[in-house]
Amino acid sequence: MQIHDVLTITVASVCALFLTNGIAAFRTVLNSTDDEQRKNIKIGQLDMTMRRYMTGEGVGYILTSVLSIMGWLMYITG
């Protein structure tokens, strides 16, 4: 096993973790009640609803994963 293979496995596992977290965030929004979705939570100094926070987190994780995969594919293909 070469270093190239080890790096590929590492990138794949990190991207899988990001995708899993993104999907879990969306499932949290889908499985919550309307009252839970509208509940205000405090993130630092920001007040936002749980729905907005979890949706943003899900999008962030999935975009990070997609960009990492695209970057890695561009790197290994030259």
Image: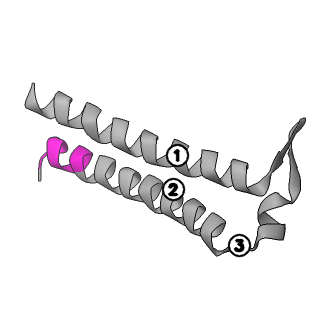
For mark 2, what is the residue? Answer: 22
Q: Would you call the spot at circle 1 few (<14 residues within 10 Å), some (14-19), or many (20 or more)?
A: some
Vertical relation: 25 (above or below) 35: above
Q: Amino acid at mark 1?
A: Val
- Location of the C terminus by quadrant is top left
Q: Amino acid at mark 3?
A: Ser
- Residue 28 image-quadrant placement: bottom right
Residue 75's tag is none
Pointers 3 and 1 in contact (C-beta within 8 Å): no
Mark 3 vs mark 1: in front: 3
Q: Which secondary structure type mostly characterizes the magenta part of the structure?
A: helix
For mark 1, what is the residue? Answer: 59
Question: Of 63 and 52, which appears nearest the observer?
Answer: 52
For mark 3, what is the residue? Answer: 32
Please report the residue visible at 61 percent of the width from the left and 69 percent of the height from the top. Answer: 30
Question: SS for tag 3?
Answer: loop
Pointers 1 and 2 in contact (C-beta within 8 Å): yes
Real-space CA distance between mark 3 and mark 1, rounded to the nearest whole angstrom: 18 Å
What's the magenta region?
Answer: 2-8
Mark 2 vs mark 3: in front: 3
Q: Would you call the spot at circle 2 few (<14 residues within 10 Å), some (14-19), or many (20 or more)?
A: many
Please report the residue visible at 12 percent of the width from the left and 46 percent of the height from the top. Answer: 2
| Left or right placement of residue 1 versus residue 21 in this view | left
Please report the residue visible at 35 percent of the width from the left and 42 percent of the height from the top. Answer: 66
Q: Earlier in the sequence, mark 3 or mark 1?
A: 3
Q: Position of residue 43 (x, y in %)?
A: 83, 44
